Image: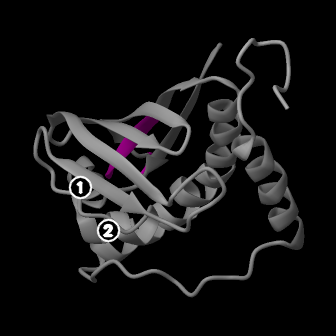
């Protein structure tokens, strides 16, 4: 069984600005994670975040497709997942006549129980990234400012319990015979 995460957002910015937020290591560090990204076909790079059970905090990626400012695809491996991430940008006219950009995002290839659990954790964070953090970076770029992260709010008390529960699922070994735990 495989699972994919897909979402689409429209931003009131031209595709070139959205592309800049997707292809600048500095901007990616603000709305996604610290990285050593370079927008070059074949470039291998990493994202770094806090380690968790079954995950060392490093996401290994490679730029697989690059067609500025329309499409970019990365491999995305870390912990129990080996997926592909794609960004597709389409120019749209906003109601006020200004250019806006439809961003279609997909992360595909979640396979197996541990990867499925990770997909739900990732999916939970995407609305915050694509609905708040990326728009904030786009606004900073529009104002000619460098991307900077706002101060972090403490997490909701239930978020830690949710993360611990899924971390236990991810850290568990997958059964060898497909019938249950091998404990």
Looking at the picture, does residue 105 appear above or below residue 31? above
Residue 50's x, y, as percent?
A: 55, 68
**Picture quadrant of residue 62:** top left
Residue 136 placement, left or right of 1: left
Q: Is residue 101 magenta?
A: yes
**Cβ atoms under marks 2 and 1 closer than 8 Å:** yes
* Residues packed near mark 1 inside 10 Å, few (<14), some (14 to 19) or many (20 plus): some
Query: Left or right: where does residue 32 sit relative to residue 45?
Result: right
Question: Residue 128 magenta-drawn?
Answer: no
Residue for badge 2:
27
Q: Residue at x 45, y 37 (%)?
A: 105
Q: Secondary structure at mark 2?
A: helix
Q: Which residue is mark 1?
A: 23
Residue 22 visible: no
Compared with residue 117, is residue 125 higher up or lower down, i.e. above or below?
below
Position in image of residue 60 (x %, y %): 35, 48
Please, what secondary structure does the residue beneath circle 1 have? helix
Residue 174 relative to residue 162: left or right: left
Furthest-front residue in this view: 183
Provide the major secondary structure of the magenta segment: strand
Q: Quadrant of residue 42?
A: top left
| Residue shown at 71% from the left, 43% from the top | 170
> Magenta segment range?
95-105
- 55 or 31, nearer to the observer: 55
Identified at 39% across, 40% down, the residue is 76
Farthest residue, direction bottom: 151
């Amino acid at each position: 069984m495989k699972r994919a995460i897909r979402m689409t957002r429209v931003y009131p910015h031209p595709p070139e600005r959205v592309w800049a937020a997707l292809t600048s290591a500095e901007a990616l560090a603000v709305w996604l994670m610290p990285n050593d990204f370079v927008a070059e076909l074949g470039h291998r790079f990493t994202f770094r975040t806090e380690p968790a059970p079954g995950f060392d905090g490093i996401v290994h990626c490679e730029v697989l497709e690059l067609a500025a400012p329309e499409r970019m695809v990365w491999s995305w491996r870390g912990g129990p997942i080996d997926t592909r991430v794609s960004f597709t940008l389409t120019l749209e006219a906003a109601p006020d006549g200004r250019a806006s950009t439809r961003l279609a995002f997909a992360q595909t290839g979640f396979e197996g129980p541990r990867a499925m659990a990770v997909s739900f954790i990732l999916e939970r964070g995407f609305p915050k990234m694509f609905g708040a953090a990326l728009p904030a970076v786009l606004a900073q770029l529009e104002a000619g400012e460098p991307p900077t992260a706002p101060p972090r709010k403490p997490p909701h008390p239930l978020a830690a319990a949710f993360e611990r529960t899924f971390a236990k699922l991810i850290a568990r070994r997958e059964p060898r015979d497909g019938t249950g735990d091998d404990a």
